[in-house]
């Protein structure tokens, strides 16, 4: 490999060469959605970012086990230890069984991800299916002395852990600063220290999602699932853990603390990767700001902020036009520009097939290949990859005009390179095949109806020659036309 892959590691705050623990195998864990609402842009960005990583690692020849969980229990409204479970609340409001809510939104999430060209992960474990593993993790942390039981709940002892291993290594926060910024909230008297977080929460009978445990009926704390499932499917130390930047603290910090406390200080993960956030017209996306747009609303254009519908591939292309560690700001103008850019790329891709080889090459395909792989290896620099692909689009146009040429071998290599980066690595698709078929169907019916209107018109004008010509030609092409009181009906002869 000429350029090794470098990835930015949040833990060390620098780009590091990626060296898998057990090459050619790579273990990748990414925090998936909490399934209590329709998927939106905030779900699309991590899914697409880590989909490109998943695709690229496979392109490099690694065998990747990609685990992306579904959070269907334990994620409370405050993202902390207080408030109602997000899924249980939705279930209560809609008078549904919590698993109906979780299942419904899991299906919606999968549909949206498929439309966005996101490959399914290798394993997609659900938190509710791993209660036993989470209880085992809590027991282990208790045994190691880094947790305590209080009124049927179990809390992680942050201060004690901090003394042994140091708390805050991922987020760079220190415990004294955190303590001075912590308000004592009501109902936290069960904890020895306000920074302690719940590993297991006791639940009263009115709670609809609860399980038996050594500490009584309850449910696992949100951070437990990823530590327990990551450990189960990827081992006690694995290569990459990813997620959105908003998960660094507390979620990922707590995941690390739990794993190290349970496992005698083993680091759990080598490379921590985080995608940055998305803003809409310069503002954070939020239900109260009126700029909360679901993916379906983007795909249909059905939202007051949207001037038109944007295809899933336009959304994907737009997200990849920015580096995953930079912010992305959505606006109609930006999406329209992305849509045009994507069309140009797709057009060039189909034009490459029609190019004729020449006896000599006027530019170096190998150089393009090197710069594409250098860009991907530089912490997945997709905007740079897209810029090089646009250089290739310009070269396609120059070749069409006869201003540049390639030999047969180079042309083949050029074509493979363009297709590999566009479709296999960036994961773009020409257009949704279904959409295309619908459009063709509509145009076809419209054209036949138009023909029948002309025939009707010529009959009224007593232009028998034209009406007979249309009738005979249509019959020849296999159309069966029936005149009824409501007008002409048609179908295709089988
Ligand atoms: Zn997680």
Image: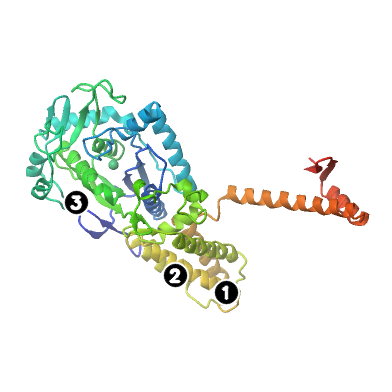
What's the CA distance linking mark 3 and mark 1?
Answer: 51 Å
Q: Residues within 10 Å of mark 1 (few under 14, many from 20)?
A: some
Q: Is tag 3's residue or tag 1's residue first in the polypeptide sequence?
A: 3
Q: Residues within 10 Å of mark 3 (few under 14, many from 20)?
A: some
- Label 3 and label 2: CA atoms lie apart by 38 Å
Can residue 436 be seen here? The reply is yes
The residues tagged by marks 1 and 2 sit, at their Cα atoms, a distance apart of 16 Å
Q: Closer to the observer: label 3 or label 1?
A: 3
**Circle 3 sits on which residue?**
171
**Foreground disc of the pair 3, 2:** 3
Within the displayed image, which quadrant is ligand 1 positioned in? top left
Image coordinates for residue 243, horizontal then vertical, percent: 31, 48
| 262 vs 322: above or below | above
Which label sits on residue 368?
2
Of residues 134 and 450, the one nearer the viewer is 450
Residue 58 coordinates in the image, percent (x, y)? 40, 51
Left or right side of 197 for 314: right
Residue 171, percent across and down?
19, 51
Q: Quadrant of residue 227?
A: top left
Q: Quadrant of the N terminus?
A: bottom left
Q: Which residue, given by chain and number where applicable, does mark 1 sit on?
A: 399
Q: Residue at x 62, y 66 (%)?
A: 354
Q: Are marks 3 and 2 in contact (CB under 8 Å)?
A: no
Q: Nearer the viewer, residue 198 or 91?
A: 91
């Amino acid at each position: 490999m000429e350029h090794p892959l470098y990835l930015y590691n949040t833990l060390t705050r620098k780009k590091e060469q990626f060296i898998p623990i057990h090459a050619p195998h790579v273990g990748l864990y990414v925090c998936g959605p909490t399934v209590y609402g329709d998927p939106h842009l905030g779900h699309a960005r991590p899914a697409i970012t880590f989909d490109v990583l998943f695709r690229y690692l496979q392109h490099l020849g690694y065998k990747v086990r990609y685990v992306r969980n579904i959070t269907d229990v334990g994620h409370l409204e405050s993202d902390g230890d207080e408030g109602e479970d997000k899924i249980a609340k939705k279930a209560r409001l809609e008078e549904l069984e919590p698993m109906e809510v979780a299942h419904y939104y899991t299906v919606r999430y999968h549909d949206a991800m498929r439309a966005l060209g996101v490959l399914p992960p290798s394993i997609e474990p659900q938190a509710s299916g791993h209660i036993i593993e989470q209880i085992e993790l809590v027991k282990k942390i208790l045994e190691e002395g880094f947790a305590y039981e209080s009124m049927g709940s179990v809390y992680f002892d942050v201060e004690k852990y901090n003394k042994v291993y140091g708390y805050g290594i991922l987020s760079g926060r220190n415990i004294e600063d955190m303590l001075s910024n912590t308000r004592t909230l009501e109902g936290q008297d069960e904890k020895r220290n306000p920074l302690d977080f719940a590993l297991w929460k006791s639940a009263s009978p009115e709670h609809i999602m609860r399980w038996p445990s050594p500490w009584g009926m309850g449910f696992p704390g949100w951070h437990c699932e990823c530590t327990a499932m990551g450990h189960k499917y990827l081992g006690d130390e694995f290569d990459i853990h990813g997620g959105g930047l908003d998960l660094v603290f507390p979620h990922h910090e707590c995941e690390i603390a739990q794993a190290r406390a349970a496992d005698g200080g083993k680091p759990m993960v080598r490379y921590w990767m985080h995608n940055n956030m998305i803003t809409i017209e310069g503002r954070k996306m939020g239900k109260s700001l009126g700029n909360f747009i679901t993916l379906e609303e983007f795909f249909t254009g059905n939202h007051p902020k949207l001037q038109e519908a944007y295809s899933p591939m336009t959304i994907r292309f737009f997200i990849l036009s920015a580096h995953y560690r930079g912010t992305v700001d959505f606006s109609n103008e930006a999406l329209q520009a992305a849509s045009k850019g994507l069309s140009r790329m797709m057009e060039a891709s189909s034009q490459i097939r029609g190019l004729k080889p020449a006896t000599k090459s006027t530019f170096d395909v190998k150089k393009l290949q090197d710069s594409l792989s250098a860009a991907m290896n530089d912490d997945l620099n997709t905007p740079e990859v897209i810029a090089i692909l646009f250089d290739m689009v310009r070269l396609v146009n120059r070749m069409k005009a006869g201003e540049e040429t390639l030999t047969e071998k180079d042309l083949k290599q050029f074509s493979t390179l363009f297709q590999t980066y566009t479709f296999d690595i960036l994961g773009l698709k020409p257009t949704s095949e279904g959409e295309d078929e619908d459009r063709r169907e509509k145009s076809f019916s419209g054209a036949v109806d138009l023909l029948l209107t002309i025939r009707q018109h010529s009959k009224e004008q007593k232009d028998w020659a034209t009406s007979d010509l249309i009738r005979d030609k249509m019959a020849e092409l296999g159309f069966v036309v029936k005149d009824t009181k409501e007008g002409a009906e048609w179908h295709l002869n089988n």
